Image: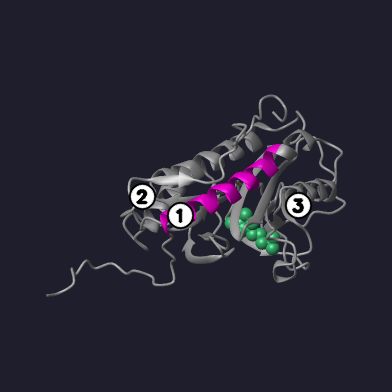
Amino acid sequence: MQEPSDNYQIDPAITIHRPEDFEGMRKAGRLAAEVLDYITPFVKPGISTGELDSMCDAFIRDHGAISACYGYRGYPRSTCISINHVVCHGIPGDRKLEDGDIANIDVTVILDGWYGDTSRMYLVGDKISIRSRRLVEATYESMMRGISVVRAGATLGDVGHAIQSYVEPMGLSVVRDFCGHGLGREFHCAPSVLHYGQKGKGEVLRAGTFLTIEPMINAGKFGVKVLADGWTAVTKDRSLSAQFEHSLAVTETGYEIFTKSPKGWDSPPYEGINA
Ligand code: MF3
Ligand code: CO
Ligand code: CO
């Protein structure tokens, strides 16, 4: 007998998790989301990114976890905070938030050995331009469209296509230099989850795969460069950039998001706290 000769590739590096592994991810994902809920009321003009980072770090430790970022490949802080034209991996420090900024806070916790990785955008103050607001809304919607096509049998190209085909007609662009990733008992593992692509192409998703979808969307061109600190990625054309991230599982019938906000604060406005 021949094996069925379906002409797609299965990447042996992609871990297929067991049903009992989901509980660890639910707890880690929930804690990562709770960190973002906790910090939300403090995201206001005048606070520094270093202060926000320290508060997140204390919250993570108080809940029996550690930050996956601190010390990761020499990364010096516990979160990434990326403002305006910073695409990702902004290092928290003395920079104070200003009215009109858009900022991403990205949190990854390790709880009982499981990784929960999530990020959201914050609109700082009340002088947010229409352009900024639209970019943030489109980025959230693109992530949710990418997630909505996830199920056993769909492909990673389907996910990328859902994101790219939504944002490009608006004149926005999808960052190519960073992608989503598998996770579980590891931070970054197979598969690489590109946020652009063609329907039906790429790896076929199987139930029990844990991954992130975390599109970085630019108001201008997709080019990115990394600053001399070795981390901070900015748009080459200095256009604004936005990002959201969820950790999720592929299931037979669809997906399970591990990092949904217990407070319902998945995208701004956050109940008037941070409109
Ligand atoms: N949380 C980021 C991600 O979504 C990774 C940050 S790594 C760090 O994959 F070292 F910059 F913190
Ligand atoms: Co991630
Ligand atoms: Co992240």
Mark 3 or mark 1, which has the lower sequence index?
1
Q: Comparing marks 1 and 2, which lies closer to the viewer?
A: 1
The residue tagged 3 is 61
Evaluate whether residue 195 shows in this view. no
Element at label 3: helix
Binning the other alpha carbons within 10 Å of mark 3 as few (below 14), some (14 to 19) or many (20 upward) gives: few
Element at label 2: loop
Name the residue located 76 percent from the left edge and 48 percent from the top edge: 62
Depth check: 263 or 195 in front? 263
| Circle on res. 255 | none
| Circle on res. 151 | 2
Counting from the top left corner in percent of width and height, residue 108 is at 65, 54
Name the residue located 51 percent from the left edge and 39 percent from the top edge: 141
Kind of residue at disc 3:
Arg
Magenta span covers which residues? 18-37
Kindly report the secondary structure that dominates the magenta region of the rendered protein. Answer: helix
Mark 3 or mark 2, which has the lower sequence index?
3
The residue tagged 1 is 20
